[in-house]
Amino acid sequence: MKRWLWIAAVLVVLTMVSACAGKPAARGDKLRVVATTTIVGDVVAQVGGDAIDLTVLLPVGADPHVFDPSPQDMAKVADADVIFANGAGLEAFLERLLDNAGGDADVVHVSEGLAFIKAEHHEDELTDDVLTDAHDHEGIDPHTWTDPNNVLRWVDNIETALVLHDPAHAADYRANADAYRAQLRELDAWVREQVAAIPAENRKLVTDHETFAYFAQRYGFEQVGAVVPGYSTAAQPSARDLAALEDRIRAYGVKAVFVGSTVNPALAQRVAEGTGVRLVFLYTGSLTAPGGEADSYLSYVKYNVGAMVEGLK
């Protein structure tokens, strides 16, 4: 073979190898998957199982509303095949991270297709910080995972994306998704049984920020108010906001103020002390480390419901 023909053949082979390198199913490697939060990551892991190589961006205990990605996070995103995010405005950092990192990963919002709860605040009653938060989230409550029935849609979206990107493991993804959907339905039934122990007149929630609207809607609670009257912990309430909340707590006979593990509890503590009600800690934006009391989505929901039942009975 003439030298120039040999060089041309080598170039063709190198081009083919390079093209296959970007396709996990073709090269035999695991699909490289990134999830934003520990909660999203756990659900992705339930569907993906051993067939994926999963990285979770946010560490345990991190608040997704105020997360600031590192250069290492940029590298993780740049190397990914698929990125799973909650969506609905939760990960305010993600668009900038993607722009800086480059790469060609498919970004899947697991909450896509849900009926979102929208803010019902009257703008003339809110401070500028809270209005900024509402506008940043486009008036949408991003905390969709507080209702396990919404996580069923997450599973659908995750399964569809994994099958699309890695059809060689489609049967595994579908079997995993079916098994996990059954666990979520059992969880929903368990929550309903537990909630039945709370007198109907006591099913009133006050939280550090507006986190549990989907949970309240599904299980018959009323979200009376929040220390930060918005969907993000980044906002700051005014003295007027806090005074109005304390008035509502007294008027509605609220039994407890619930505060998430990822936020500073100082303001919630102040409200609880000012109204003489209990301060109860929940898990909101993050799971615990492995082996902790809320180290999976299922145990996270069970812990929170147990704490609510104890705090509101």
Image (tube, grey):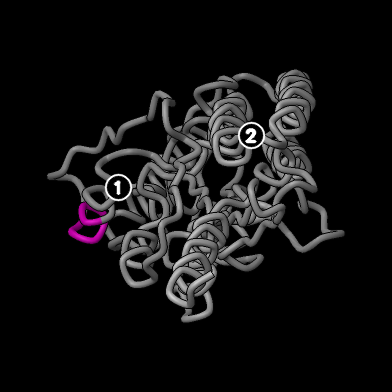
| Residue plotted at (42% across, 49% down) | 246
Q: Is residue 302 left or right of residue 54?
A: right
How many tags in the picture? 2
Residue 76 rendering spot, x and y as whole percentages: 54, 69
Q: Which residue is drawn at 53% across and 28% down?
A: 216
**Quadrant assignment, res 164:** top right
Q: How crowded is mark 1: few (under 14 residues within 10 Å), some or many (20 or more)?
A: many
Q: In the rendered image, is residue 280 in sight?
A: no
Disc 1 secondary structure class: loop
Q: Which residue lies furthest to the bottom in this view?
A: 71
Q: In this view, does 149 lie above or below 141?
A: above
Residue 255: name its quadrant.
top right
Q: Is residue 78 above or below residue 183?
A: below
Q: How far apart are marks 1 and 2 (CA)?
A: 34 Å
Quarter that holds the C terminus: top right
Q: What residue type is labelled 1?
A: His
Question: x, y percentage for residue 247?
Answer: 38, 44
> Percent position (x, y) of residue 47?
71, 37
Q: In which quarter of the image is the N terminus?
A: bottom right
Name the residue carrying label 2.
167
Q: Residue 14: which disc? A: none
Q: Give the range drawn in magenta.
A: 127-132
Q: Are marks 1 and 2 in contact (CB under 8 Å)?
A: no
Q: Which residue is drawn at 52% across and 48% down?
A: 84
Categorize mark 2 by other alpha carbons within 10 Å: few (<14), some (14-19), many (20+). few
Foreground residue among 160 and 209: 160
Residue 21 left/right relative to 118: right
Q: Say which residue label 1 marks.
A: 137
Taking the image as shown, residue 151 lies to the left or right of residue 42, namely left
